[in-house]
Amino acid sequence: MRGDERYGRSGSKKVLALVSELLEVPYPGIWTSYDKEADDLYINFKKPSHADDSELTDDDIIIRYEKGEIIGFTVLNASRRRREYGHGV
């Protein structure tokens, strides 16, 4: 099955629209996963990652650290943020 058949052309366009933003991220690799049940989006900059510290920001983002360097974010209530920024759920 081709990618455009599985995700649809609109899905491909949404991903491609992120390209310019992703190229600006100061990390060479980015891995993401979304837990729909928990509504948490995990963004990792290192694989494997083993956080030894973290902090919870006022806007419900957990910043994860390994040896003092940011290795990822956990975005809590991720679907709510889509609505906040004018996107549908």
Image (cartoon, grey):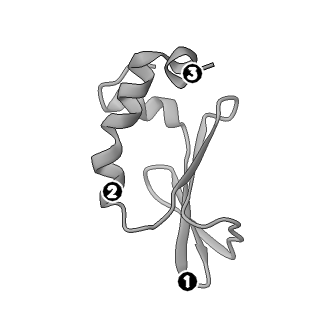
Horizontal and vertical percent position of residue 29: 51, 62
Residue type at mark 2? Leu
Q: Residue at x 47, y 59 (%)?
A: 57
For mark 2, give the secondary structure.
helix
Counting other residues with Cα less than 10 Å from the Cα at mark 1, is it few (<14), some (14-19), or many (20 or more)?
few
Q: CA distance from mark 2 to mark 3?
A: 25 Å
Near-viewer residue (26 or 54): 26
Task: Name the image quarter holding residue 35.
Answer: top right
| 82 relative to 52, above or below | above
Q: Which one is in front in this view, the residue at disc 1 or the one at disc 2?
A: 2
| 73 relative to 11, above or below | below
Judging by the rendered image, the residue that carries numbered circle 1 is 68
Residue type at mark 1? Gly
Judging by the rendered image, the residue that carries numbered circle 2 is 23
Badge 2 or badge 3: first in the primary sequence: 3
Q: CA distance from mark 1 to mark 3?
A: 42 Å
| 49 relative to 32, above or below | below
Q: Residue at x 60, y 69 (%)?
A: 54
Judging by the rendered image, the residue that carries numbered circle 3 is 2
For mark 1, give the secondary structure.
loop
Horizontal and vertical percent position of residue 43: 55, 53
| 36 horizontally vs 76: left or right | right
